[in-house]
Structures are given as structure tokens and as C-alpha cells.
Amino acid sequence: MSTIRPPATIGIIGGGQLGKMLSQAAKRLGYRTIILDPAAACPAAGVCDEHLVARFDDPIALAAMGSAADVITYEFENVASAPLLQLAKETAVYPDPRILHTLCHRTREKTALRKLGVKTADFIPIDDPSQLAGAVDQLGLPAILKVSEGGYDGKGQQLLSCKSDLASVSLAAHHTLEAYISFSKEISVICARNIEGEISSFPVTENIHRNYILYMSIAPARLPEETAQRAVEIAEQVVEGLAGVGAFGIEMFLQPDGEILVNEIAPRVHNSGHYTIEACHLSQFEQHIRAICGLPPGDNRLHRPAVMVNILGEGKRPAARLAGIPDLMRIPEVNLHLYGKEEVRPGRKMGHLTALADSLPLALERAGAAHRLLRWEDD
């Protein structure tokens, strides 16, 4: 495939914050963008050139995007792969929908990783409720029961600590039982590979979750250099092995003995890579656009220590406004990103902030101080 040069058109399936930031990166390079999203007021609606308001699997809308776009990508992995496989027969779609089909299902994902020689938690697929007790006997407890498709931010997951927990389990869909991993840190790497096979990784980030939702990403991760290098090597092994094109978020567990296990792979730009907008020469979003358009990867070195904190919705006030912004803006080197979502919901990602500094402790201090200033108030 030849290089896709501006002012070509990039189709993006999904108009959430990731679709918005992908569109912004694409337009800065001179590309046109078409967004497909059923929400008329989705975050990307205000920054794209065209917005197809339709379901993600709508055949008419997908055909229209395929006719208008030179290349198509997506911002989240819970889009059905079958329509994209059909679309890819006429228009380039990256990452390849066959990769999406593999990675959107936990059992298929971990099976593929094992075939690549990558270590994961032990797992057993659960196709029928009658299999659960035997799987628990085989893996032992504690273990985590996860819905195989559609879960994110901890949705569809249940910790099984003792045999009595099995009585409350409802298995209406395919699940994967995974051995519980006692880890010292959660880390991730944003790794991008372009059409020509050139591969490039951003620095390792250290991630802190609250209630299964990413709260904070710290870059660079507080790791020994050899451990960080090993994490990058694993991420690149995964993306190379999958023959992926685009940016991938590879989430990993660092165990107390130093062993690294891959937990999940997102075939897209990733929440833990938002710090790259300010802290690196180019962002994960531009790196993704470069990759799917056949352009060379850019300089992804970290030029400032950075800490990203998610801004989540709280309470039951869908029309609430965020207070504390003027005070936040008085803190040096703190960057605020609000996504423009109309409805505030508990746990919903409404924005993020990134604090930079000459040292990581100072970046952590600034990020914490800025986040503490923010609060949701009635409109």
C-alpha cells in the first residue's frame, strides 16, 4: 500500500474522546476526517469534517464511510469485527479487523498471546455454567471471572475468593476464568507499527486504578531500567507478532519477582498514553495517524516527566459543571483536557489533566494538587 498523503480522508469509527483526539491529530497534519457515531453531540462531532450519525454496525453508514475514506480506523475494540471485515474488502481498515476479532475476546486474546510466546495469567474458557466448578478446582482461588466480550473498566468481572462465591455467579454469556495475579505494579506501553513494519514504542507508564478504572498514569514508570526495557520488548513482540498496524496499548502486570505478564491488549490508542500530548515530541494520536497512513514514526522520546489523572463524573447530576478550573490553571505546567460530553455520570471519563515538571515527584505533587481542586457542582 502506498503512503496516504494529506488531504486524504480518514474514517474513524467512534466519536468519543479518543476519536476526538485522533481527529485533531489528523487535521493538524492536513487530513480530512469522517466520524461514525450514533450520538449527534459526541465529543468528536465538533472537530471532524463529517459526522455520520448511525449505529457502529449500520451497513449504509459503513458503506458511505468506505466510499468517502481513504483509510479507516476505530477508537474502541467493542465494535463488531464482521462488518469491518466486509468493509476491509473495499477500503483499508487498520488495525486489521482480524486482529480486532482476536483481541475483543479474552480467551482468543490470551490464546494468541501464548502462541506468540508471551506470558499471561493462567486461564480457562467457560462455555457452560457446569464447567465453572471444575475450572475453579483446576486454577484455584482466588480467581477472576470475566465476561469474554464487551467488558471494560472492570465491567463484567467478578472476584471469586472462596467456593461460596460461586453460588452468586450468573453465566448468561461466555466467560473466561483467570488466575488471580498478585502484582507489584500495573504498567503499560503504547507501541505503534506502520504499514511498512516500522515499530516504535513510547516510554513505559505506571498505572494506578481505582474501582477498576484508570485513575493515574505516571511517565516514566518507576522501574529499574532493565525492567522497563523488557516491558518494551514484550510490547513490540506482541505488536510485531500480530502484524498490527496502528497504535496498540499493551497492559501488563509486574510481579514481585520481576516477571512481566501481559494482561490485555487494546488495538487502539489508550487512556494511559494521554500524557504523550504534552510530554513527548508527538502524541500517541499522531503516531497512530502516521502508522495507518504509511508515514514514518515520529520521535516519541519523553522530554518531561509527566503524570496524567482522569477526571471522572460523580453523583447523580447529569448536567453538573466542573468547578475549580481557574485555580487549577494557576498551577504551573498543568494541562486540562475536557472532552465535551453532555451528560455527567458516575465513573464516566469526562476529561483528564496532565502535569509536567523537571522531576517526577514534583509532577506527582502538581497533579495531585490540581485534581483536588476540581469538583462537580449543579449547573
Image: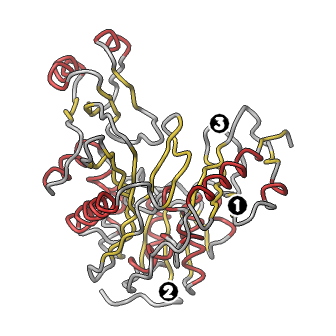
Give the labeled residue for mark 2: 8
Q: Residues within 10 Å of mark 2 (few under 14, many from 20)?
A: some
Q: CA distance from mark 3 to mark 2?
A: 39 Å
Give the labeled residue for mark 3: 346
**Closer to the camera in the image, 260 or 105:** 260
Give the labeled residue for mark 1: 336
Q: CA distance from mark 3 to mark 1?
A: 20 Å
What residue is at 40 percent from the left and 46 percent from the top?
A: 186
Is residue 326 at all visible to an observer of this figure? yes
Q: Which mark is residue 54?
A: none
Q: Position of residue 29 (x, y in %)?
A: 55, 85
Earlier in the chain: of badge 3 and badge 1, it is: 1
Is residue 57 at all visible to an observer of this figure? no
Going by the image, does 199 lie left or right of 14?
A: left
Earlier in the chain: of badge 1 and badge 2, it is: 2
Please tell me in which quadrant of the rendered image residue 72 appears.
bottom left
Going by the image, does 12 lie left or right of 248?
A: right
Q: Position of residue 348 (x, y in %)?
A: 61, 43
Of circles 1 and 2, which is in front? 1
**Three-letter amino acid code of the residue under disc 1:** Leu
Q: Is residue 211 above or below residue 57?
A: above
Q: Secondary structure at mark 2?
A: loop
Of circles 3 and 2, which is in front? 3
Q: Position of residue 120 (x, y in %)?
A: 23, 45
Q: Residues within 10 Å of mark 3 (few under 14, many from 20)?
A: few
What residue is at 36 percent from the left and 62 percent from the top?
A: 84
Q: Secondary structure at mark 1?
A: strand
Please tell me in which quadrant of the rendered image residue 221 appears.
bottom left
What residue is at 25 percent from the left and 42 percent from the top?
A: 257
